[in-house]
Image: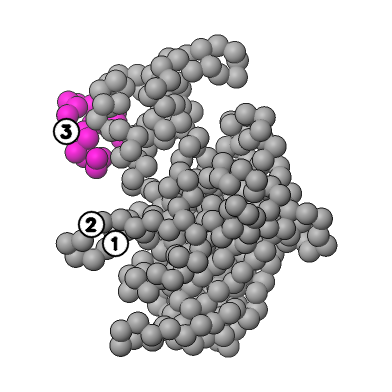
Amino acid sequence: MPYKRALQIINEEDEEIWTHDVEEAFQEALIQYPAEKRRIKQSDGKFYGRNILISHYIKKRCGKTRTRHLSTMNMIIAPDTYRNKLLGLTDYGAVKFLQLHENHDTEQYFTDITTFLSNICDLLKYRKVSGEKFALLSVLLYTHEIPYSNVITRGFTCISNFIIPEIKLSQVKHHFGQDLIELYKKTPKTAFYLVKSWNNWYYPNKENKSLCIWENIFYSPYLLNAEFKVTLYIQGKSIYTFIVDHMEVEEIIFGLEKYFIYKAKLQVNNDDNEDSYTNTQAIYFNTIKKVIDSGNFQLLRIIMKNLSRLIVVTDQDTCETLLVLACINDYMPEFTGYQYFRIIP
């Protein structure tokens, strides 16, 4: 339910109480504290009611105390409203592709990378996340371990909300040190995006022993000498940069139009390997798996929020920055999805 519509049921005098940031925190808390669990045990060993925990979450998230109307708001804004607003992947790892044709409101799901790639022509016309010359198709992680061969486990696609919200550079720059600031100065603002992901860490169960592949796929009506670069950060400090200086290019015909598909594939084998990127990602996956096994979900969320990636695609012939994706993470139990933002000064 849209923000203003939800507030219509509440007295006008309370509109300033339920501001946008408070409602957003409220929606997050609904997912974190499921309705079926009326009393929830916390790290101090005590049990608390759901509304008290939601109130504490809003206080921690926004610095504001809210106790009135929690039960009413609980009925107005169901968790599924927030899930559907952000959802790009299902809780089971399948990519959710919305059919955006006029008068056609059906949905299509892709659980494996092969089927997804065979249907990419349906996505090309929308150019939802793009600069003037270059557009994102998807950034997806899948595995090669039987019985999960080619199963998509997490990532994001070009499907986004009709209106992409804005976020200030000052709110996210700390995730990337000075790199984001310097990049923002020389990149067309139309090609600059933030993507926030809520990652799936439960499927497949044997991922910590499998070969994982990050498939980064873009497209353009132009044949370009594109370079793909991804930098990993912990608490705003870069720990490794991986570059694909010659992306794989494939030409496809869609109706009367011609497109070029650009791919940068990064493999992560969680066994011992001399490659620095592979080792970094393997440590990352295995650390997360240990935290999940311990059941410490608050620690998991802290770890996720301190990890970030900066994806930059550049035209090597002109040195023009074609597309920037500043990627940050968060965690909610049993929830997988993503949301795009346009970064503004």
Q: How many residues crowd around disc 2 within 10 Å: few (fewer than 14), some, or many (20 or more)?
A: few
Q: Residue at x 56, y 45 (%)?
A: 203
Residue 40, visible in the rendered structure: yes
The magenta segment: 1-20
Q: Secondary structure at mark 3?
A: loop
> What's the CA distance linking mark 3 and mark 1?
31 Å
Going by the numbered disc 2, the residue's amino acid type is Asp
Instruction: Determine whether label 1 and label 2 are within 8 Å by CB.
Output: yes
Residue 208 point in image, percent of width and height: 69, 47
Above or below — where is 263 with respect to 98?
Answer: below
Label 3 vs label 2, nearer the camera: 2
Residue 291 point in image, percent of width and height: 67, 35
**Quarter of the image containing the C terminus?**
bottom left
Q: Earlier in the sequence, mark 1 or mark 2?
A: 1
Mark drawn on residue 105: 2
Residue 344 point in image, percent of width and height: 42, 59
Residue underneath mark 3? 8
Q: Nearer the viewer, residue 97 or 60?
A: 97
Label 3 vs label 1, nearer the camera: 1
Mark drawn on residue 99: 1
Q: Nearer the viewer, residue 161 or 4?
A: 161
Q: In the picture, residue 190 is in which quadrant?
A: bottom left
